[in-house]
Amino acid sequence: MASNQELFERAKQVIPGGVNSPVRAFGAVGGTPRFFVRGKGVTVTDAEGRPYLDLVGSWGPLILGHAHPEVLAAAREAMERGTTFGAPTETEILLAEAVRRHLPSIERVRLVSSGTEATMSALRLARGFTGRAKVVKFAGCYHGHADSFLVKAGSGVATFGIPGSPGVTEGTVADSLVAEYNDLAGVEAHFAKAPDSIAAVIVEPVAGNMGVVAPAPGFLEGLRELCTKHGALLIFDEVITGFRLGLGGAQGRFGVTPDLTTLGKILGGGFPLGAFGGRADVMDKLAPQGPVYQAGTLSGNPVATAAGLKTLELLEASGTYLRLDALAADLSAGLDRVAGAAGIPHRVNRVGSMITLFFTASEVTTWAQAATADTARYGRFFHGMLERGIYLPPAQFEAFFVNVPLTEADVDRVIAAAAEVFATL
């Protein structure tokens, strides 16, 4: 049996950095990444046979836990009929109908293969619909790795301290206007300078990639008013929050209607799947009906759509989100209590089943405040929890996810482990 270290050394010979997504490399926390061989419920097992209680959940998609039997059965049945056709299937229609049923702002939806593809396509569509070039985004928010979104982005970009990325042109940077999350005045200033040039404002309605940060009262409503006033489109990136904060996503939770929405993660039930959708008049500009081109060989993949459809069906069970909120509230309160008892400067931010423990004394409502977090202390906390069999995100600026199979006993175990680790920090 190969060790995690041996696998990592092999991987580095054939894969840049040894990983296929940067934050997996443990660069922000140090040490050797864990190579997982199986998962069941909220437990994952690494190449050395060691189990961990998983609060990452593949960075959000696995709200039903690993290897849910009904999701696996739906995927298996779909695979037996064929893994891909490059042609329409009824399951695509069924999933699109389910999305529209739960998210009424989405009158039309286009299925793609990832969250990055969804946001990239939504932005192109916004530019094509409005005939404008500029987009307003927010420091610390992450919308995938398309060029326009890498300027002062969150997630791995923030983790590695990268202000942008080589390969992004000056023209792209010039068309990307950056504001501070929760700062409506900054967005107003951009519109004042370029009132007829902004195609869209794109925002995580609940930030999940600078750590979890809730929208301030009136922030989302203000964005809606500004976009309506200036003829720009409001895009909610709900790749994380879609079906995570409720079947209606963040827009249902906060009662604000975007023009376009991007989805991913939970939508695919653990398989690669994304989507973007919104107002019919905007979506009808897409080819083949309109002039804005977007395509994909594996878009609407029958295995992924079957898994996603089954996931949404299971999430419709009464009480699911109330239970997730309650467990997450208990976990947040417990982490806050034991960190405080140990005298550790901290903030615990939570929205629904998304949590971030920031190692800072500052309130965290913006990226500037999130950036004050002690990332070295988080790294020590991460490894202390890992030694106790708790797998957390290997980066400060990410979310813990509470998923359906988690139990009250699991929450107690995490809090007890955290108390032990805090005593060593």
Image: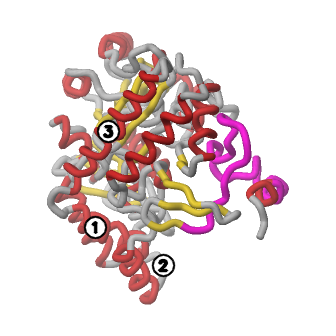
Q: How far across and down, in percent of the image, does residue 390 sit?
A: 53, 48
- Which residue is label 1 attached to? 95
Quadrant housing residue 266: bottom left
Residue at figure coordinates x 38%, y 81% from the top left: 73
22 within the magenta span: yes
Q: Where is residue 215? Give x, y as percent.
A: 29, 26
Inter-mark Cα distance, 2 to 1: 16 Å
Please tell me which of labels 2 and 1 falls first in the chain: 2
* Res 100 seen here: yes
Which label's residue is closer to the chain start, 3 or 2? Answer: 2
Magenta part of the chain: 9-38
Amino acid residing under circle 3: Phe
- Please name the residue that numbered disc 2 is placed on: 84
Q: Distance from label 3 to label 1 (Cα)?
A: 20 Å
Q: Secondary structure at mark 1?
A: helix
Kind of residue sitting beneath label 1: Leu
Q: Report which residue position mark 3 lands on.
A: 236
